[in-house]
Amino acid sequence: MNEMNKQLALARFCKSFVLTVMILAGIEVQAHAFAGAAGREQSSPQKKSATKQVKSYSCPMHPEVKSTKRGKCPKCKMDLRLDPAVTSTAVTGKQNLIAGNAIAEANISSNAPGYATKMVIPDVEVLDQNGNALHFYSDLIKGKTVAINFIFTNCTTICPPLAATFARVQKDLGDKAGRDVHFISISIDPLTDTPERLKAWGAKFKAGDGWTFVTGDKQEIDKLLNALGASVSRREDHSPTVIVGNDLKGVWTRTYGLARSVQLVGLIMDVSEGKVDESLTKETAKP
């Protein structure tokens, strides 16, 4: 009888033990589930915080140079400007770092984005300083080596120095100017800049043969400026960009239009020969 009681007592003990283990296991499972839910709730704000409105900055002279931060263009050292169209983009800190490094490590070579083997230039109808109707590509660019800048006659800041620089370069080139190299100044204010105004303005800088001042219908000029990457919402915001190109050999580049004339001459001569000297371009690009 005592033996039977012992067995019954042992059975009750085992049953209680099993129930206790099961209850404890259930509590632990619930605790893990709660912890997981709390972790997900905490990580959600972190993910949201990783998504932010990213402002895009680019170089007015080298539109392909872009960054999510303010800074200077590694090619020409000009301040990067805030792009007019701001896109909402989800980025992480790592992605932002990659973007920054891409700008910092940008190099200058004939294969870099700033140097194109092709440039699509519209053959829009324009007027020169003598009132002649021309087709921009066919008459001024096709088969030629050209240097192009952008001006307006009421400008009192960078336009006079840009024209003065062109005048010095034209003088330094001697008989090559107008024969091997052609200069083009495009008005970014065609509503004001008539052929007569452009001719008088060019005379102040002793513009010689082979230097063409371009104006025309605003719609056509806007189309041209867009194609050349020189369109701005306010004329005062235009940059001192000079585009140097050899249409025959398909070499195009942009540079700083207020560089020393000897540097610009070197760059123009290289482009006329179908090449761009990397070290010279870096030096020319410095303000």
Image (tube, rainbow, N blue to C red):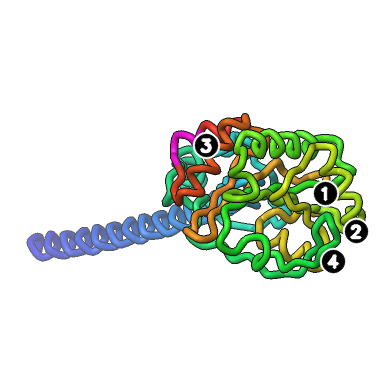
Which-is-in-front pick, marks 3 and 2? 3
Say if the magenta span includes residue 285. Answer: no
Q: Amino acid at mark 3?
A: Gly
Residue 88 appears anywhere in the view:
yes
Could you tell me how far apart the alpha carbons at marks 2 and 4 are, in whole angstroms? Answer: 8 Å
Give the mark, 1 or 4, whose residue is nearer the N terminus: 4
Where residue 113 sits: x, y (%)? 49, 52
Vertical placement of residue 20 versus 108, above or below? below
Q: Which residue is mark 2?
A: 191
**What amino acid is at disc 2?**
Leu
Label 1 or label 3, whichever comes before in sequence order: 1
**Quadrant of the drawing holding the C terminus:** top right
Q: Which residue is mark 4?
A: 217
Q: Quadrant of residue 27?
A: bottom left
**Tag on residue 266?**
3
- Tag 2 and tag 4, C-beta contact below 8 Å: no
Mark 1 and mark 3 residues within 8 Å of each other at the beta carbon: no
Q: Are the residues at dot 3 and dot 2 in contact (C-beta closer than 8 Å)? A: no
Instruction: Write the start and end of the magenta stretch as one range.
Output: 277-282
